[in-house]
Amino acid sequence: MPRKILHLDLDAFFCAVEELEDESLRGKAFAVGGRPDQRGVVASCSYPARVFGVRSAMPMAQALRLCPDLIILPHRRGAYSAASQAVIALLHDLTPQVEQISIDEAFLDVTMWPEPAAEIARRLQATINTKLRLPCSLGVATNKLIAKIANTVGKASASKGQPPNAITIVPPDEEAAFLGPLPITELWGVGPKTATQLERLGVRTIGQLAQWPEAELVRRFGKHGHGLARHARGIDERAVETVRETKSISKETTFARDVTDANTLKRTLRRLADGVGAQVRREGLSGTTIKLKLRWDDFTTLTRQITLDHTTDRDSEVYTVAVQLLGEHWPRGKPVRLIGVGISGFEDPHRQLGLWDDNAAREQDQRLQSTLDELRDRFGWDSIQRGSSFKPDDDC
C-alpha cells in the first residue's frame, strides 16, 4: 500500500504570529529581523513585502531600499516557540509519526488513516487555520522527497501578496511525471556546484536527469550519483523520523561594525561558548569537534576545527579551543564581520575517565556548570555574567 506523507510549512510563520498580536499589520509590508544600522538581516517578511522583492536572509538595509515604508519588528522568540509548540501538538493529535524539521516545518506519516491523504491534508489545514489562526501550506505524496517539492511548487505558484495557504497533491505513480519538467535545482542533493556540472552535460530538468543511467551518474559523481538517480525518478524510501539526532550545536553573532580588536573577539567567543555549552548540556550531549567560524569584511567566510581525543560539554574547554583556533587563523588586525563557535561529533557523555584525569577538578567544574545553568534558566541568561565580559583578556 502506498504511503501517505504530508509536508507542512507554516506560511511566513514569524510574521503570521506577529499579526496575531497586532492585527493592524495584516496587509502591510513588514519584516521580522535585526536593525539595519546593526547589519540585521530579514528573518521573515510578510507577503505584501515580498511583492517589493524583500526576501528572508536579505540584509535589512537592502530590504529598506527595496521597500522604504517597510515596518521592522524585532524577534520575539518566546512567542514563535509557543505558537510552534501549539502546531506540533495538533500534529501529534493526528498521528504519532511526526518529524519536526524546524520551528515552522514538519513531515507527517498518515498512512494509518483510511481517508485519502488529500482529505486529511485539507482537514489539518482547516484546523490550523481556524483553531490557531495561522496560514499553512501542505505537500501530499507517497514519500518525503515528493511531498517537500510539491509544497515548494504549490507555494510558489500561489497568488502574490498574501499567504499561499496551498495544498499540492502528487498522486501515487505520478511522481516522475510531476518531477520531470522541474529544474534540477529543485531536487534534493543538487546544489550550485552539482547543478553547474549537470548543466555542462545538457541536463537542466529533473526529467532529463532521470534519463541518465545510474551507473553513469555514479561514474561521474561517485556515491552521490546513486541518490541523484533515485531522486530524479521520484524514489525516496526514508521513514518519517519521530526522533531527530542533533548533529551539531553552534552560536554566532554579526557585529554592528567590523571588529579588529583581539580582546573584543575573545570576549565574544566567551559568551558564545557559554551558550553552546549550556545547550549541549541541556540536550544531554557531549562532543569531540569544536569549530570556529569567521567572516571577513568582504563576506569571505573561514571555518576551522579541532577534534579532541575526548568528549566535552564544558564551556571553558569549548572557549579554550575556539581561542586557540582564533590565534592560529585570524591575521591580527584583520576586520571581522561575524564570529561563531560550534561543537559536533556527539558521543556518550558518560565516558570512562582516563587514568590521569583529575576527577575532583572535573566534578567541581561540573557542579559549577550545573549551578550556572540553573540560575540562568531561573532568572534569565544575563543574570550571571563572567568577569571576563567586563575586562580585557590577554592578547591572542
Image: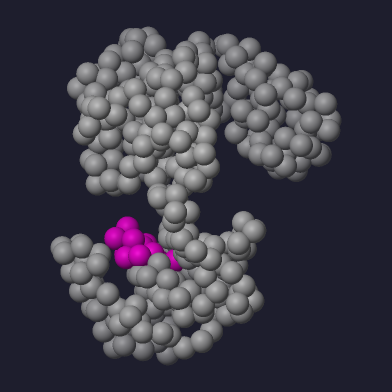
Q: Residue at x 67, y 24 (%)?
A: 183
Residue 69 locus on image (x, y percent): 41, 34
Residue, x 34% and y 61% (percent of image)? 279
Q: Main secondary structure of the magenta part?
A: helix
Q: Is residue 7 magenta?
A: no
Q: Does residue 150 lie above or below 87 as drawn?
A: above
Screen quadrant of the N terminus: top left
**Against 395, is 260 above or below?**
above
Q: Let me know if residue 280 is in the magenta part.
A: yes
Extreme residue toward the right, this view: 201
Residue 142 in sight here: no
Q: Which residues are magenta?
A: 275-287
From the viewer's perspective, tell me whether residue 11 is left or right of residue 387.
right
Judge by depth and name the residue closer to the eye, 298 or 320: 298
User: Is 287 displayed left or right of 206 in the figure?
Assistant: left
Q: Is residue 81 above or below residue 171?
A: below
Residue 329's spot in the image, x, y percent? 63, 74
Residues 199 and 93: in front is 199
Pinpoint residue 343: horizontal percent, then vertical percent: 47, 64
Q: Quadrant of residue 351?
A: bottom left
Q: Nearer the viewer, residue 199 or 354?
A: 199
What colour scheme does the image use? one colour
